[in-house]
Image (cartoon, helix red, strand yellow):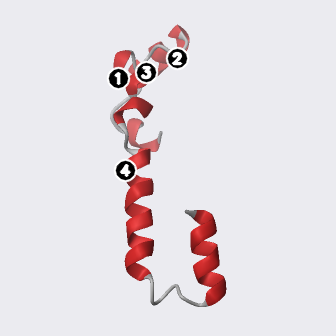
Amino acid sequence: FKSEFQKMNKDGNVGVNYVNILWMLLRLRQACNHPHLARASLVSPSASLPPADMLAARSLTPEERPRL
């Protein structure tokens, strides 16, 4: 997709081909939202965190949590 966009940009056809660009962005978004990319985190979201970090995260106050 990047090379196609760069070619359109170089040729000055970005404005003319905006539908194709939106289609490419849609495909990239669909690829990034694929469930297989999140499978490991769905199985055990805390599996990659050390126990000490989990304990520290649980001890945060509600005011501190948004700052993470």
Q: Residues within 10 Å of mark 2 (few under 14, many from 20)?
A: few
Q: Mark 3 or 4, which is nearer the eye?
A: 4
Q: Earlier in the sequence, mark 4 or mark 1?
A: 4
Q: Between marks 1 and 3, how big is the CA–CA gap?
A: 5 Å
**Tag 2, which secondary structure?**
loop
Instruction: From the image, tell me which residue sits under label 4.
Output: 30
Q: Earlier in the sequence, mark 2 or mark 1?
A: 1
Instruction: From the image, tell me which residue sits under label 3.
Output: 40
Q: Residues within 10 Å of mark 1 (few under 14, many from 20)?
A: few
Residue at 40%, 20% in the rendered image: 45
Q: Mark 4 or 2, which is nearer the eye?
A: 4
Residue 4 sits in which quadrant?
Answer: bottom right
Q: Earlier in the sequence, mark 3 or mark 4?
A: 4
Q: Work out which residue is located at the far right of the displayed protein and give it.
A: 10
Say which amino acid is labelled 1. Leu
Q: Mark 2 or 1, which is nearer the eye?
A: 1
